[in-house]
Image (tube, rainbow, N blue to C red):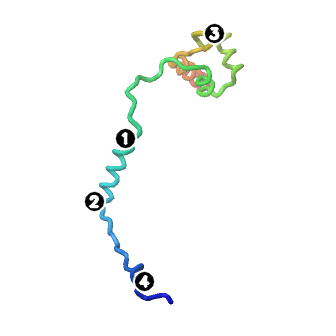
Amino acid sequence: MWSLSCHTKSINMATEILTLEDLQQFRLQLLEDLKALFPQSTQAPKQWIKSSEVRKMLGISHGTLQNLRINRKIPYTRLGGIIFYRLEDIVKLLEEGNTSKNH
């Protein structure tokens, strides 16, 4: 038979009340933990990017990027078998494209 005392013990568990101060302390600790997991980079932004990154930025295919190189619309540097582009040239190309659409 089931005893009443066992049932009473399970119901009378301690209740802990959280205060706003407790929540604030938890938030601060959580932020510190996240900062430790994801340290901020002190590296300078990239100056050179690869073809795959350019295609993704511009939303274009490999062939379109090749045509931009052939038609000298976009400067590049080949190092071994990898083609690199200066980020500022890509940004300039984007800005020029945006300007021509507005006029």
- Mark 2 and mark 3 lie on one chain; the one further toward the N terminus is 2
Separation of residues labelled 4 and 1 (CA atoms): 46 Å
Q: Amino acid at mark 3?
A: Arg
Q: Nearer the viewer, mark 1 or mark 2?
A: 1
Residue 5, numbered label: none
| Secondary structure beneath label 4 | helix
- Mark 4 and mark 1 lie on one chain; the one further toward the N terminus is 4
Q: Amino acid at mark 2?
A: Glu
Q: Nearer the viewer, mark 2 or mark 4?
A: 4
Q: Can you say whether 14 is above or below 76 in the image? A: below
* Residue displayed at 41% across by 22% down: 44
Name the quadrant of the C terminus.
top right
Q: Residues within 10 Å of mark 3 (few under 14, many from 20)?
A: few
Q: Which residue is mark 3?
A: 72
Q: Amino acid at mark 4?
A: Cys
| Secondary structure beneath label 2 | helix
Q: Which residue is mark 2?
A: 21
Q: Residue 25: percent from the left, percent from the top?
A: 30, 54
Q: Residue 35: percent from the left, percent from the top?
A: 37, 41
* Residue displayed at 42% across by 83% down: 6
Q: Residues within 10 Å of mark 2 (few under 14, many from 20)?
A: few
Q: Quadrant of residue 14?
A: bottom left
Position of 33 with respect to 75 (left or right) is: left
| Secondary structure beneath label 3 | loop
Q: Which residue is mark 4?
A: 6
- Mark 2 and mark 4 lie on one chain; the one further toward the N terminus is 4
